[in-house]
Amino acid sequence: MRFETKAIHVGQAPDPSTGAVVIPIYQTSTYAQEDAGVHKGHEYTRTSNPTRDALQTCLAALEGGTHGLAFGSGLGAITTVLTMFKAGDHIVCGDDVYGGTFRLFDKVFKHLGIEFGYVDTSHPDRVAKAIQPNTRMVWMETPTNPLLKISDIRAIAAITKAAKVLLAVDNTFMSPALQRPLELGADIVMHSTTKYIGGHSDVVGGFLAVADPELHTRLKFLQNAVGAVPGPFDSWLTLRGLKTLAIRMAAHERNAVTIAAWLAKHPHVEAVLHPSLPSHPGHLIQKSQASGFGGVMSVRVHGGLEAARRVCRSTQLFFLAESLGGVESLIEHPAIMTHASIPPETRTALGITDNLIRLSVGIENVADLMEDLDAALSARS
Ligand code: P1T
């Protein structure tokens, strides 16, 4: 079965009792047992639920994994991964990650004794140098949020395998329709399913996919023990979104590639960060490991903070909002919004400057989106 077919059929056979072609929302917290310990495969919904099972089976298959685990948010998924470790363990983390991921590591797990080293993972040699005897995992995003830096998954997987540490890739920006890190050597793929997988900005969720049954057993134990699970309705909404992932991603991609090339020549734009541009330093690596460039880009506008703020509040179709990956276009200001939890000095050093805005290009008509951006850029000054 190919990707588009898997998205609609894997884990989603018609309901045996009614023939319903859509997996029902099993809105139940518990399941009646015939005798103590004798049940039909489900005991309690934190542990398992048929609607969640369908999502887990389908999305794991799309990622090329053997198993998947769904969570109530992306950060719930990351938290669960981190509970595999103990005080004194060390994690190498990309220096450009979603602000909430950095906050979770720096303000929660660091205080519990887990150590973190931050490196630019777009240079695999820096990852190799950062690995210490107590390193247990490398955590990275590619493309990164919000600077769209590209890291070579195959090269880093070779490094982590040799060092016997886990490689976890946050695949939120690409989705499995464009990039499948497990097939490139990663051990864990993580998603904020809030984004492209749900796809309609109506549900928050997270996901982990693995290709190693032993790692799945460890993480499944923690999914139940920690309890950051999604409810049946959220699982159902996410699965409903997943069915159209391939066609949505193609539409996001088409619009974003057109807009990136146009903005790169726009007189009010200083720089466009999108891997589709041949001038992007990660362009060739992106082409070698993914089948597209995705719908998110960041743009440095001419002028400073005020100019960027004005652009953000002047668009009509691009809503000024956090998040990304929904069918509607969004615009946001990372330094003030999604990455505010990163200290200002670090933001500046990384390049999350005050004139940086991030676009999540939706699937509206691209000419309407360009007119909207053009008018907002003209209102800049
Ligand atoms: O919001 P949540 O579902 O908990 O997922 C967190 C998360 C993890 N990883 C990446 C790459 C993300 O982009 C996010 C969430 N990001 C936003 C809300 C945002 O606007 O960037």
Image (spheres, grey):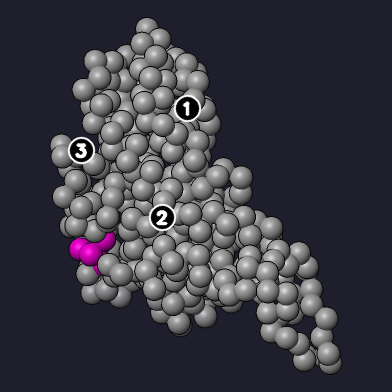
SS at mark 1?
Answer: loop
**Count of marks placed on residues:** 3
Disc assigned to residue 277: 3
- In the displayed structure, would residue 305 be above or below residue 326? above
Would you say 250 lies left or right of 126 here? Answer: right
Label disc, if present, on residue 318 of the rendered structure: 1
* Residue 378 appears anywhere in the view: yes
Residue at point 45%, 54% (across, down):
245
Q: Which residues are magenta?
A: 153-157
- Amino acid, disc 2: Ala
Which residue occupies the foreground of this view, 84 or 176?
Answer: 176
- The residue pinned by badge 2 equals 246
Name the N-terminal-most of marks 2 and 1. Answer: 2
- Find residue 362 and report its horizontal and vertical position in percent: 44, 37
Residue 154 is inside the magenta segment: yes
Q: Nearer the viewer, residue 74 or 162?
A: 74
> Of residues 330 and 108, which is closer to you in this image?
330
Asked which quadrant contains residue 134, the reply is: bottom left
Q: Which is more N-terminal, label 3 or label 1? A: 3
Q: Amino acid at mark 1?
A: Phe
Q: Amino acid at mark 3?
A: Leu
Q: Could you say where residue 57 lies in the image, as x and y percent from the top left?
A: 52, 72
**For discs 2 and 1, the disc positioned in front in the rendered view:** 2
Residue found 41% across the figure and 16% down from its top: 376
Check the image and report above or below for 44 versus 287: below
Give the left or right position of residue 1, taking residue 264 as reference: right
84 w.r.t. 205: above or below: below
**Label 3 secondary element:** loop
Residue for point 38% across, 19% down? 371
Q: Position of residue 361 (x, y in %)?
A: 41, 36
